[in-house]
Image (cartoon, helix red, strand yellow):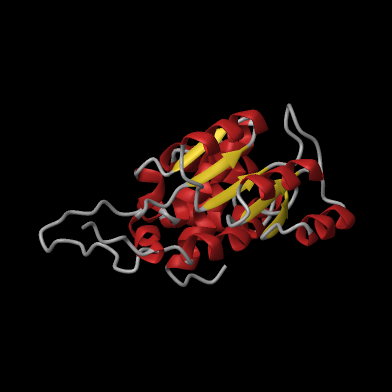
Amino acid sequence: MNTPVPASAAAASAPFEILVIEDHPMMIHSIHASVQALRPDVHANAGVMTVCTLAQARKRFLRRDPPALIITDLNLPDSRGLDTLRTLRALAPGVPVIVFSAADERTTERAALELGAGAFVSKSALPQRFLQKIRPFLMNHMPATAPAASAGACHAPHPIEQLTERQRTVLAEAAAGHRDREIALRMKIGEQTVRTHLSVIYQRLGVQNRTQASMQYMAWAKAHDVVV
């Protein structure tokens, strides 16, 4: 006779999956960059699924088990405002939902939290704010026993560790919210030099803009106890 597997054991063995519901390409890239920085294991194992509409999310729920986490915009091509959150809470009542929205009114944030959102982040917030909000949800689902690295394994250093000291300083300044002119004045270099450094940084980190680069830096800094 087959012994039933306890729900807790099944959950522990199930892969960690994040469902992102977003239709703006830049925001999708930013979310993926944040997940990759905080949980490279999830990103590397294709644990992030992105859909652009609520209808696509519905289909995903019908075909697969619920994800471990949902990150969603409120305004989608086929759903607007808090109705999006209400629908998701009904489809996956036990799954934490992080709202990442351009609607940054306090009344909207309060209403979303009252409806059961685990966190609410405005798209106008600094990158470190988004990282701070999603980090607990990602880290609380770390495997009980993380795979140990083999003694002979060769691990490539983090891309940020491959930057020069000057490039890393420029990136730290950008992540702190300083603009190009401010960075130039603080570092006593030319503004064009700052832009050149940032262009190289984006290329080396595999990102497209300042927001994505800043998110990677903030995650790396937290992991290495670097004061930001």
Q: Nearer the viewer, residue 175 or 169?
A: 175
Query: In this orientation, which residue lies closer to the viewer: 14 or 24?
Result: 14
Report the label total.
0
Residue in the image at 30% along x and 54% along y: 157
Answer left or right for 170 relative to 24: left
Above or below 76: residue 121: below
* Relative height, residue 99 to residue 114 (above, below): above
Q: Residue at x 26, y 61 (%)?
A: 3
Q: Quadrant of residue 128?
A: bottom right
Residue 41 appears left or right of 202: left
Query: Camera-side residue: 72 or 179?
Result: 72
Q: Residue at x 46, y 53 (%)?
A: 37
In this picture, residue 107 sits left or right of residue 50:
right
Query: x and y percent of residue 117 in the render?
Result: 70, 57
Which residue does the image show at 50% across and 59% down from the upper left? 138
Residue 224 seen from this side: yes
Q: Which quadrant of the view contains residue 96?
A: bottom right
Q: Does the rendering let one see residue 188?
A: no
- Farthest residue to the left: give it: 152
Which quarter of the figure is the N terminus placed in? Answer: bottom left
Residue 42, image x, y percentages? 40, 50
Apparent side of residue 75 relative to residue 1 in the rendered image (left or right): right
The percent position of residue 182, horizontal first and vertical second, equals 70, 53
Where the C terminus falls, by quadrant? bottom right
In which quarter of the view is residue 192 placed? top right
